[in-house]
Image (cartoon, rainbow, N blue to C red):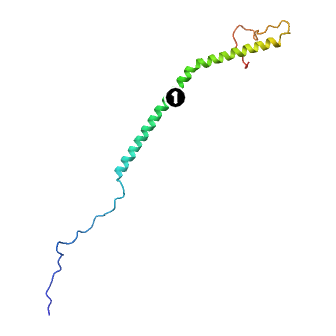
Amino acid sequence: MSVPYRQDMPPPGGFEPIRYKRYLPFKGPSGAVIFGIAMLISGFGIHGVGMANREKRELLREKTWARIHLVPLLMAEGDRDMYRRTHAALEREKEIMKDVKGWQYGGKVYNTDKYIPPSIQI
């Protein structure tokens, strides 16, 4: 008995397409997006450092000018203090040496006509 020959045929509508590509799930942004975000953050950081440096420079300038304007006041205060101490020292000398004959209080210590500021604290 002979069986009729029957050829194997594709199903109606054809076979499914062969999957040859890699279908990987989405795992985050691309490298270009990450690089762009990193550059944006770095740009904001550099801008912040620049603004902080500008503020620091301005505060230093303000501090310098404040010191420059305070110098005459501080010098005058030092002069008043020196005058007060010198006057008090002369009064003490006058009181201590009142019994010594021929003593001139407040006389020169050095044999010169130049002004020599006191070398020790009065």
Query: In the image, is residue 100 above or below residue 40?
Result: above
Q: Image point 85% across, 7% down: which residue?
A: 101
**Foreground: 24 or 82?**
82
- Measured along the vertical axis of the image, is residue 31 above or below residue 56? below
Which of the image's four quarters has the C terminus? Answer: top right
Quadrant, the N terminus: bottom left
Q: Is residue 26 above or below residue 12?
A: above
Is residue 61 found left or right of 105 in the rendered image? left
Q: Residues within 10 Å of mark 1 (few under 14, many from 20)?
A: few
Residue 75 percent coordinates (x, y):
62, 18
Say whether residue 56 is left or right of residue 81.
left
Residue carrying label 1: 60
The image quarter containing residue 70 is: top right
Q: Amino acid at mark 1?
A: Leu
Q: Residue furthest bottom?
A: 1
Residue 85: horizontal and vertical position, in percent? 72, 16
The quadrant holding residue 110 is top right
Q: Residue at x 60, y 18 (%)?
A: 73
Q: Name the element at disc 1.
A: helix
**Could you tell me residue 76's position as x and y percent?**
62, 16
Q: Where residue 3 sits: x, y (%)?
A: 15, 89
Residue 15 visible to an observer of this rendering: yes
Residue beneath the point at 41% across and 44% down? 41
Residue 117 visible within the image: no
Tell whether 37 sits left or right of 74: left
